[in-house]
Amino acid sequence: MRLIERLFARVTDPDDSIWVRASWWWLASSILALVAAAFYAGQWIGRPRLALVAAVVLMMWPFAHARMWVMRHLDRSLSMPAPIGVALAFVAALFDAAMIAQLLTARASYGRPFLDGDITGWIGPVWFSSHAMIFFALGLASPIRRVTRWIRSTRRRPRPVSRERRDFLRGAGQLGVGLPFAISLSGVETSYDFQVEEREIELANWPRSLDGLRVAHLSDIHVGGAMDLEKLTRVAELTNAAKVDLVLHTGDFLTHRMPGFDEPLYEALDRIRVEHGQWACLGNHDYDNPVRFVNRLKGCGVEALRNRMVALDIAGERVEIGGLDFAFYGRDRAERYALAIERWGPRSAAPRILLCHDPSAFATLPGGCADLVLSGHTHGGHVGVQLGSERALTVVGLLGIPDQGVFERGDMKLYVTRCVGFYGYPIRLGVPPEIAVLNLRRKA
């Protein structure tokens, strides 16, 4: 009851303009409509329905919280006339509607030319990611305010706030409102700024005869939406121009859209020319119809390794390439990986590269099962500050998950690529995509 009373008090806050209250009611109605849609899309009973409803609440509540902060801040700091406030709320509601429509029709069986246009297709990602940044900024602002108040309370005489300082703080607050939207908009260009990054990776047991073997590592292409044939053709051209010996993919080729959405993927992959072939494992987004998908990949020259290993003859040396299916999280994940690798037989002296979509699995793999493990999945951390070509400051990395670059465990090394594409919201912010070219060297 107390929560309901607090919510009602917020809606009826006499300091709010009518357009601010109207925005609150619009957001509340949108959340209820999405919850109803989640119930409709889920099973009659069971976990799928509860998971969908929980996802809606976890996504939309912070979004609504950030929106109301923005609306109240603009209303009280600018004292906007009612017509301007109404126009602002109306435009925001239109963007909300576009974002929600994109979410609800992401796996529709019909075309969405208006929602997937060159400009309109970015409304949802930019709109959602900017609100997400505002929400997290508010979460950081609260403890900072408390510390600041405590420091002020320890002073004997509080300094009066001058008019100039008050005006400066008000202007800074207005700039802070617009900054997340500007940053998110800049992510549109970053998301498709494909870069070829050359890496030198030294491996303890790598044969001298293969010193300098060049491997292109591609991951998380996520075909669909704005990741169209033109952009995928660019990826293929850059890969060909790198003149590599083989191409290794670590999954998440797909993005689940309307029928035929994946056709550009096969056309682009078929354009890659490489002496020792293209090999792949599957990612968590590749399992809608894996049998059909594996056959389509094979038709364009990509061999999917589903818990199996192949041996290649490169410059007279045997090189083993293994691929693991994505293990959806569970307590037996390490056992499943160990069992799959055990079926390949005793480890020989031949060098081995292992394809495993999820880099967090590196810690659970059997020791010494490969010389080099390749992974994607994290999109390089997706949001962060890039510190050179091999390191970044990202939330994913701070959580202890390998986000990008080289990691070691005994004689095994893991390389996590920043990946080619991205999936869903938010768009890439500060972390550009990558076509990784790995020069494999024998450790001195």
Image: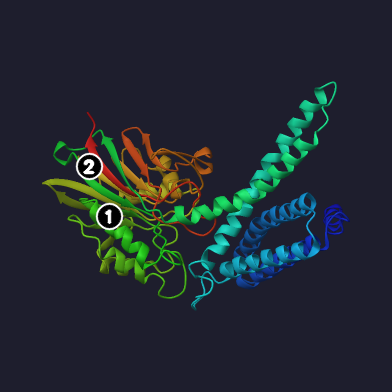
Q: Residues within 10 Å of mark 1 (few under 14, many from 20)?
A: many
Q: Position of residue 426 (x, y in %)?
A: 54, 55
**Residue where numbered disc 2 is placed:** 351
Is the C terminus in the top left, top right, bottom left or bottom right quadrant? top left
The answer to whether any part of residue 45 appears in the image is no
Residue at 30% from the left image edge and 40% from the top image edge: 199
Q: Secondary structure at mark 1?
A: helix
Name the quadrant containing residue 34: bottom right
Q: Amino acid at mark 2?
A: Pro
Q: Position of residue 53 (x, y in %)?
A: 65, 63
The dot on residue 147 is none
Name the quadrant containing residue 388: top left
Q: Residues within 10 Å of mark 2 (few under 14, many from 20)?
A: many
Q: Amino acid at mark 1?
A: Thr
**Residue where numbered disc 1 is placed:** 239
Q: Position of residue 258 (x, y in %)?
A: 46, 74
Is the N terminus in the top left, top right, bottom left or bottom right quadrant? bottom right
Q: Earlier in the sequence, mark 1 or mark 2?
A: 1
